[in-house]
Image: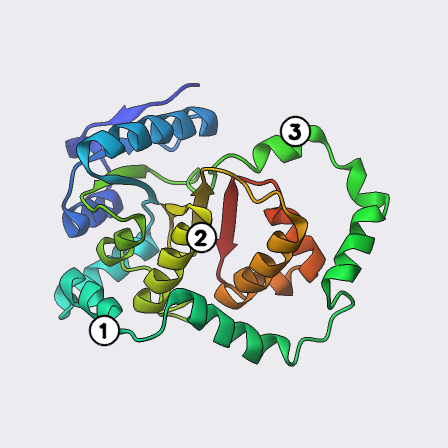
Amino acid sequence: MGIKFIDDEKCNEYTRTIINFVNCPHKIISENSDVEDVNAEYEKAVIRGKKEGFVPVLVSADSVLAEWFSFDDDSDYSKEKILEDVKKETRSGSKLLEEKCKLYFDDYDEDYEDFEDYKQYLEDDFWEDEEDDEEEDSDLLCSFTDNETILFEIPVKNPWEVIAWLPFGGWNECPEPVEMMMICHYWYDEYKAVPAVISHDTMEFILEKPISDEETAWEVAKQHCVFCSECIESGSLCEVTDSILDSKVWYFWWD
């Protein structure tokens, strides 16, 4: 199937709305394109972006996201204000996550409560039966397949700043854009995790190097659960940790 690009004048109305809101260089990719080829196109953009001074982000252009961006466009939204609000924050992203983890896990009541339980979980036989191709799939960005996808070249130096251009969050339990940017800043500094895909209800990060240390993955799993409660609601803390360990992609979904 390969990858198929769409001319701006031939894209659908949702794609056009999002493009007009973000207003920066882009390519439009058909929903019929192969996931592997879209990932390859993204990786080429990452390499080019380091030379040309931009951060690529894949945006799944659906009606819900287009509607949100329409609201922001009509409001007093300002990417400069979001960036300024982040600078005014006295807490770091690390401190913010620490506070959230303390509040959440003080009341945590699951079968696996500490790292020793996770090590025991790793010794169980059932998880070893997973197919090898599932592990390979964990290294692919994928939450853009149902819609036209826009590969934006966001003109920022720091990856976490893309959130100001794509103000994602602030509904249900999804963090507000300022908090999200603080957390993205910390995850980039600590793990080189880069926001790579955004849709109206999902977000994916890609890492230059996966976390291979089990105890580090366990601590990051707690951070994932307070960043996106769906992580823990759909499985145990051990399972969240297992999804992080040796994976280049972090996937989040908010109901």
Labels 3, 1: front one: 1
Q: Which residue is drawn at 78% across and 60% down?
A: 116
Which of the two residues, 115 or 163, is positioned nearer the viewer here?
115
Q: On the picture, is 164 further left or further right than 24? A: right
**Residue with the mark numbered 2:** 190
**Residue with the mark numbered 3:** 133
Asked if the residues shown at circle 3 and circle 2 are in contact, with their CB atoms under 8 angstroms apart, the answer is: no
How many angstroms separate mark 3 from mark 2 (CA)? 28 Å
Vertically, is 75 above or below 106?
A: above
Amino acid, disc 2: Glu
Quadrant of the rendered image containing residue 237: bottom right
Q: On the picture, is 210 further left or further right than 94? A: right
Quarter of the figure that contains the N terminus: top left
Quadrant of the rendered image containing residue 135: top right
Count of numbered badges drawn on the protein: 3
Amino acid, disc 1: Lys
Quadrant of the rendered image containing residue 178: bottom left
Q: Where is residue 63 in the image (x, y as percent from the top left)?
A: 32, 52
**Residue with the mark numbered 1:** 88
